[in-house]
């Protein structure tokens, strides 16, 4: 390993991979992945990536308006304009990187529509395996780049900040504690789904980047806005849930309650294609009214061969659960899916700490407002990843006064699973789709006590830092939810 890097990228999802790939060949990049380089939220994305392939101002403006409407007009207009107007360049660059979006027989790229979109503007790959296809293509390229060093199964546990300037990171690999220095660092650590009992996120999504940024007092904003995906496959086993893509409704799927009745006409004029916050809250209300814990997604009226070709992954997974979606209703319920808020960044992904950048789900670029429009998340990763890389490319060469420091530590085998489960239970019960002041205060007191206990019983290990990060981010979310009294976007207060 090198002693000094131009950029350390923490996270191997789309935000991290695309940022690293856009850095010039003469810059040294270290890419750190907590798990295998292929494991991330991005790889699980089914629906697709929103954007315009051509420079079309009318199309851009419609995309902007749909995003504003979904985000309750709390979006940062400058960031949103950047997202949409730079979409075509980055989508074409993804194709240049080897991403094969689905095409028709004449070679035209197929577009679908999802909730909140007024037009078909979502590109997809592998039918319903867009994230996997994109990540696989980019990983192949990253592995070929001589200027990119990859550290897998390594957890970044803290940032090294001197006089409000980030100069490196502290990482943990098994029992090796290492300080690595750099000119710049990019947090691309993904989501917070592991804070909840039920989520579409992988188990690595413990909010690490947000917690690390919090420990160095970087600005963090809008954490009350936690998006719940309306249609995860329902079963009574807690944990990671299989996502039934919004594109299923985009292609004509109906939502029905347990009595078999369509119900979205009671809640929104766009029916099943209303924004996600509306659909999730509507399902919650319908389950409450019918004394049930799930509803159904119905595509039995669609042509069977079309379903199998368009949604091969979903079709097979439903079969694995004993459901033939061409003939039977799919049981679904909302679960945690996406953190809308995060580490505050500017139009170039720069945080309030000098030389510290953030990209993707861990950051708050301002594009999503109070609720993310479907399939804008992958677009956010590439648009702002390219901007971060441009800043790194413009940095002048310099030498570090620091040297890499490596320390062998005594390995702790304590797994903290009980505390982890308590956090998940507390968040699921008290900080879900619908929130009340008394529940939020209870959650705050519970999580605050956990943090106090953790700090008094520190054991350096991946398990310790994951649970500390989970508790840290949980408390940020809870405090944000307490402070925002009104219901807006995906933050719904019953009181």
Image (cartoon, rainbow, N blue to C red):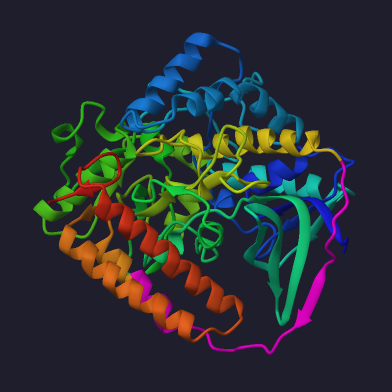
* x, y percent for residue 193: 44, 59
Image position of 136 (left or right of 324): right
Q: Which residue is found at the position 34% from the left and 78% from the top?
A: 449
Q: Looking at this view, is 276 or 188 the one in front?
A: 188
Q: Which residue is found at the position 45% from the left and 67% from the top?
A: 470
Magenta extent: 397-424
Q: Looking at this view, is 196 or 478 the one in front?
A: 478
Q: Looking at this view, is 235 or 229 the one in front?
A: 229
Which quadrant holds residue 172?
bottom right
Q: Quadrant of the N terminus?
A: bottom right
* x, y percent for residue 273: 32, 32
Q: Which residue is found at the position 62% from the left and 22% from the top?
A: 88
Which quadrant holds residue 195?
bottom left
Image position of 63 (left or right of 347): left
Q: Residue furthest front?
A: 163
The magenta stretch spans residue 400: yes
Q: Which residue is found at the position 61% from the left and 15% from the top?
A: 54
Q: Looking at this view, is 311 or 442 the one in front?
A: 442
Q: Is residue 308 above or below residue 162?
A: above
* x, y percent for residue 182: 78, 54
Please indicate, yes or no, whether residue 76 appears anywhere in the rendered image.
yes
Which quadrant holds residue 138?
top right
Image position of 462 (left or right of 361): right
């Amino acid at each position: 390993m090198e002693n000094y890097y131009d950029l350390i990228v923490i996270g191997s999802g789309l935000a991290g991979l695309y940022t690293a790939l856009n850095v010039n060949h003469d810059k040294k990049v270290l890419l750190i992945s907590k798990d295998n380089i292929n494991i991330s939220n991005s790889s699980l994305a089914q629906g697709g990536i929103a954007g315009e392939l051509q420079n079309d101002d009318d199309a851009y403006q419609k995309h902007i308006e749909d995003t504003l409407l979904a985000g309750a007009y709390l979006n940062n207009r400058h960031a949103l304009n950047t997202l949409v107007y730079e979409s075509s360049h980055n989508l074409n660059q993804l194709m240049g990187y080897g991403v094969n979006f689905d095409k028709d027989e004449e070679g035209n790229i197929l577009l679908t529509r999802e909730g909140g979109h007024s037009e078909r503007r979502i590109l997809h790959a592998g039918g319903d395996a867009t994230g996997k296809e994109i990540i696989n293509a980019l990983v192949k390229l990253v592995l070929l780049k001589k200027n990119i060093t990859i550290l897998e199964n390594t957890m970044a546990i803290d940032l090294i900040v001197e006089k409000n300037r980030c100069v490196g990171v502290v990482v943990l690999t098994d029992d090796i504690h290492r300080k690595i220095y750099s000119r710049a660092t990019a947090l691309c650590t993904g989501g917070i789904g592991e804070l909840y009992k039920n989520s579409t996120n992988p188990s690595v999504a413990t909010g690490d980047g947000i917690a690390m940024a919090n420990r160095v007092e970087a600005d963090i904003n809008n954490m009350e806005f936690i998006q719940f995906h309306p249609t995860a496959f329902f079963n009574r086993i807690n944990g990671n849930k299989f996502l039934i893509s919004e594109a299923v409704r985009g292609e004509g799927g109906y939502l029905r309650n347990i009595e078999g009745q369509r119900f979205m006409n009671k809640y929104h004029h766009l029916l099943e294609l209303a924004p996600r916050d509306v659909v999730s809250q509507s399902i919650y209300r319908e389950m409450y009214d019918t004394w049930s814990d799930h509803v159904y997604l119905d595509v039995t009226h669609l042509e069977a061969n079309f379903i199998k070709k368009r949604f091969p992954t979903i079709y097979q997974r439903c079969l694995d659960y004993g459901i033939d979606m061409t003939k039977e209703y799919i049981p679904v319920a909302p679960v945690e899916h996406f953190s809308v808020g995060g580490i505050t960044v500017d139009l170039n992904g720069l945080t309030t700490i000098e030389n510290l950048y953030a990209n993707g789900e861990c950051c708050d670029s301002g594009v999503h407002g109070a609720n993310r429009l479907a399939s804008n998340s992958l677009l956010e990763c590439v648009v702002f990843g390219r901007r971060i890389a441009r800043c790194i490319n413009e940095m002048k060469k310099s030498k570090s006064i620091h040297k890499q420091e490596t320390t062998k530590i005594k390995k702790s085998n304590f797994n903290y699973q009980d505390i982890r489960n308590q956090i998940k239970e507390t968040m699921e019960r008290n900080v879900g789709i619908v929130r009340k002041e008394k529940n939020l205060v209870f959650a705050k007191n519970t999580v605050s006590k956990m943090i106090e206990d953790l700090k008094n019983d520190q054991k350096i290990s991946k398990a310790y830092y994951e649970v500390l990060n989970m508790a840290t981010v949980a408390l940020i979310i809870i405090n944000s939810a307490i402070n925002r009294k009104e219901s807006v976007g995906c933050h719904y207060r019953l009181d």
